């Protein structure tokens, strides 16, 4: 193996994935920052307790994504309430 190939493979762990870079350029910046913060927290939990991270990381991440989506829907409904005030005032909730 050449010296160049050895240096490449030594630094390969620092090369980001193509999918990660593609998502970072397509989605809004705050989403990318949220994913980065979540990855750092998951890495910290993994360093503290590997069994706990293997058991809970995916479930917690999925719950946070679903919760964010539900809050987004609630915000949109709240904003729509102001636009359709006459209709919303007649609803029972």
Image (cartoon, rainbow, N blue to C red):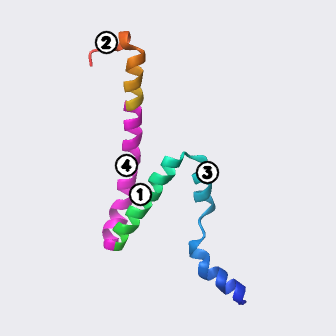
Q: Is residue 34 magenta?
A: no
Q: Secondary structure at mark 1?
A: helix
Q: Label 3 to label 2, Cα distance in Å? A: 42 Å
Badge 3 is on which residue? Answer: 25
Give the left or right position of residue 92, taking residue 5 as reference: left
Q: Earlier in the sequence, mark 2 or mark 4?
A: 4
Which numbered tag is attached to residue 89? 2
Badge 4 is on which residue? Answer: 64
| Within-10-Å neighbours for mark 2: few <14, some 14–19, many 20+ | few
| Within-10-Å neighbours for mark 4: few <14, some 14–19, many 20+ | few
Q: Quadrant of residue 72?
A: top left
- Given residues 36 and 59, the one toward you in this image is 36
Residue at 38 percent of width and 18 percent of height: 82
Q: Secondary structure at mark 3?
A: helix
Residue at 60 percent of width and 78 percent of height: 11
Which numbered tag is attached to residue 38? 1
> Would you place residue 34 above or below residue 47 in this image?
above
Q: Mostly what secondary structure, the magenta segment?
A: helix
The x, y position of residue 10, in whole percent, is 60, 82
Q: Secondary structure at mark 2?
A: helix
Start and end of the magenta stretch? 48-74
* Dots 3, 4 in contact, CB < 8 A: no
Q: Label 3 to label 4, Cα distance in Å? A: 22 Å
Give the left or right position of residue 39, taking residue 25 as reference: left
């Amino acid at each position: 193996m050449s010296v160049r190939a050895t240096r490449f493979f030594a630094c390969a762990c620092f090369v980001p994935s193509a999918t990660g870079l593609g998502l970072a350029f397509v989605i809004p910046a705050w989403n990318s920052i949220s994913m980065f913060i979540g990855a750092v927290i998951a890495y910290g939990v993994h360093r503290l307790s590997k069994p706990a991270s293997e058991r809970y990381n995916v479930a917690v991440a999925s719950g946070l994504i679903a919760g964010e989506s539900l809050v987004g829907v609630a915000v949109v409904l709240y904003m729509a309430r102001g636009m359709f005030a006459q209709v919303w005032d007649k609803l029972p909730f």
